[in-house]
Amino acid sequence: MNWKDYMITLLPELSIIAIIVLLLLIKIGSDGWQKDRFLYFINALLLLNFIAGLFIQPEGHLFHEMYKATRLTNIEKSILNGGVLLISLQSFSWLKLHKHAEEFYMLMLSSLLGMFFMISSNNLLQFYLGLELSTIPLAAICNFDLDKRQSSESAMKLILNSAFSSGLLLMGISLIYGATGSLNFSEIIPKLENSTLLLFAFVLVTSGFGFKISAVPFHLWTADVYQGAPVAVTSYLSVISKGSLFFVFTSVLYSLFRPLSNDWYPVICLLAVLTMVIGNLFALRQTNIKRLLAFSSIAQAGFILVGISANSVTGLSAVVYFILVYIFSNLGAFGVVSIISSYTGRETLIDYRGLYKTNPLLAWVLAISLFSLAGIPPTAGFFGKFFLLIAGAAKDNYALIIIAALNMVVSLYYYLVVVKTIFLHGDESPIEKLPVPILSRIALLICVAGMVALGLLGNVYDFIQSVCSNF
């Protein structure tokens, strides 16, 4: 393979590296740009990066098959690129007031680069290196509200929990290497057998992933980190980080651990049930909007695990489609929270009383986002959960589907409590009329359009299923 083929195959990663290098040059080689000018410039770069990822779809293997590029990995990277662009647009008002905007983008894109290498990993060593590259910068940007103690605590809790989960993963990887003598997926799969050592390795790897995706009982760090971090970082953690890890976790289960599918099926089902139930029960008690959305994201992870349990093309398609829907839904909600938090610093649920009176656009975007997260038709969230449940039902495990359906009812309650607070509760001093920057307004409208369009256009799911059929 010549250098041009290498460049094209690695284009998603190289474009991120190019943006990081350019940001570094801007930071050290100039006296500083006007903040508005810089933010428009970086958002234009992220838009070009997203468009390039959509239209240039390389396929192939590199580095002795340690790295793979397929249609599915390209779609997954494009979904993450789109999510990062939306987060950047929504964070305009916060970053405009922050003196370290350049560093924020360098760290966020470094984390995204690690996620790209994880998604394309065909080797356990590359997967682990990508995981570390995606995690370490996150701890730094969790501490980006430099004058808030909660932000520092958030970063500390994230790095400690990440170190523990990475240790579990590394221990599991070492056991797999010891049992099979290889780190490449293609060489490990034929050597996997139902042995005690490999089953223990699977438990360690799954536990490591459980911390990363906030599955119960590995979820205890999530709400504290989400509450303490800046809203833009919370958005990134709940959508981009979690989405990428679900992409990788599904790939690992469906390829590397497929020979052990009969053994891991009950484990995934148990994790799904615990995650849905605990996430929803704790969400019922929350009065802080960020903590409520944190426990909501834990419950959503349980629904994704229901789809993963199918171990089929239908399950993979449902997971990819749901994460696409989840990006629009969750970023719509966090986008509103970000704007309100950056201008007022108010994050408790009671602060949102009467929001519709003064900020109808923000109120409607938040309401539609919550409807989609709850799975109310005709929003895309309904179809996303429907496809996950259909995939999970393929194993005739109707108890799992009934539990998931009941949890949808429970989640509907706390989502509607927020909507009721926004529209029906009056208040003598609601949040004042807030100026919504044009970039943030565009991002919110894109989220609403995505939630509506993905629910009405069945072609998107059909396309994803056609891509996943070649997995």
Image (cartoon, rainbow, N blue to C red):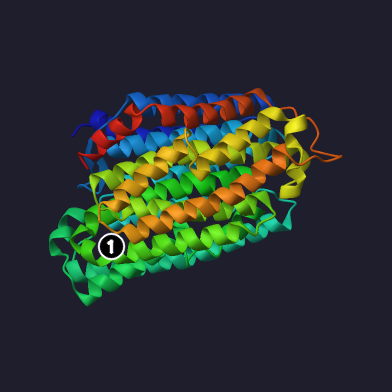
User: At 78% from the left edge and 30% from the top edge, which residue is drawn?
Assistant: 433
How far from the left and from the top, in percent, is residue 410?
A: 54, 54
Local SS, label 1: helix
Give the quarter of the image for residue 369. Answer: top right
Residue 132 appears in the rendering: no
Residue 151 appears in the rendering: yes
Residue most extreme to the right = 428
Q: In the picture, which quadrant includes the C terminus? A: top left
User: At 81% from the left edge and 34% from the top edge, which residue is drawn?
Assistant: 432
Please determine whether, in this image, residue 257 is positioned above or below residue 3: below
Task: Give left or right: position of 113 versus 57.
Answer: right
Q: Sort mark 1 into few (<14), some (14-19) or many (20+) by Cα contacts within 10 Å.
A: some
Q: Which of 376 and 91 is in front in this view?
A: 376
How far from the left and from the top, in percent, is residue 395?
A: 25, 56
Q: Nearer the viewer, residue 309 or 79?
A: 309
Residue identifier under label 1:
265
Q: Which of 437 and 65 is in front in this view?
A: 437
How far from the left and from the top, in percent, is residue 81?
A: 44, 35
All told, the count of numbered labels is: 1
Callout 1 amino acid? Tyr
Task: Give left or right: position of 63 versus 145.
Answer: left
How far from the left and from the top, in percent, is residue 277?
A: 49, 61
Task: Give left or right: position of 341 versus 25.
Answer: right
